[in-house]
Image (cartoon, grey):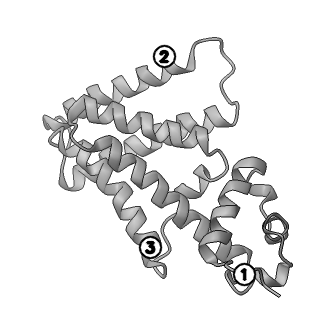
Amino acid sequence: MPRAGLNQQIVVREAARLVDEVGREQLTLAAVAARLGVALPSLYKHVRGADALAQKLSAFATAELADELMTAAVGRAGADALHAVAAAYRSYARRHPGRYPATQQVPDPADPDHVVAGERAVRAVYAVLHGYGITGDAAVDAARTLRSALHGFVSLEVSGGFGLPRDLDRSYDEMVASLDAAFRAWGSGWTS
């Protein structure tokens, strides 16, 4: 008999907590069922399988990250907005090392919530870039640059990929300052 009150949202939230504790490779339906105290077949009433759970986890994590990026960007512009969004991005990845990688998945067009979450995350980045005067196709290029830089740094950081003794906070701040300089130049039309 399924546990009373169990629904897809509860299953996905528990999967999110679990993936932060054990990593994506260890996330299984059986592990989620055990954490929820239900038999594995009970989960199939709420998620169609491991792939569906991974997709719903991606939608959930993307929505969380989008919320944090939007909150960081509100009322800010230029370097202030960039630094705030970069700090929020890094903070999310550090607090949620298991679910952060799920935010990198392209939203599933069959899941409207996932699409909306992805659009909100992109809107936060575009708001930052707009403050530099970067719009249109240039904003797509600049957004890819920003995402690549932030993702590269935080992915290396959470996986222990930095071994040199220099302070990571300082290195991150230097990277964001470099992005600020690039976006100021970009917004002035040095590239097309």
Q: Nearer the viewer, mark 3 or mark 1?
A: 1
For the C terminus, the image quarter is: top left
Discs 3, 2 touching: Cβ within 8 Å: no
Q: Residue at x 81, y 57 (%)?
A: 26
Q: Tell me where residue 46 appears, x and y as whole percent.
A: 67, 82
Looking at this view, is 14 or 147 the one in front?
Answer: 14
Disc 2 element = helix
In the picture shown, does residue 39 fall above or below 151? below
Q: Which residue is mark 1?
A: 4
What residue appears at the point 83 percent right and 75 percent down from the top-left corner?
A: 38
Q: Nearer the viewer, mark 2 or mark 1?
A: 1
Quadrant of the rendered image containing residue 157: top right
Determine the residue positioned at 20% across, 36% down: 77
Q: Earlier in the sequence, mark 2 or mark 1?
A: 1
Residue 107: give x, y in percent of width and height: 48, 68
The quarter of the rendered structure image containing the N terminus is bottom right
Q: Residues within 10 Å of mark 2 (few under 14, many from 20)?
A: few
Mark nearer the viewer, 3 or 2: 3
Which three-letter amino acid code belongs to the residue tagged 3? Asp
Query: Badge 3 is on which residue?
Result: 113
Q: Secondary structure at mark 3?
A: helix
Position of 18 with respect to 130 (left or right) is right
Amino acid type, mark 1: Ala
Left or right: residue 96 versus residue 151 is right
- Residue 55 visible? The answer is no
Residue type at tag 2? Arg
Instruction: From the top left corner, tell me how far across and down residue 81 is, in percent.
Output: 28, 36
Whether tag 3 and tag 1 are in contact, CB under 8 A, the answer is no
Label 3 vs 1, first from the N-terminus: 1
* Location of mark 2 (residue): 170
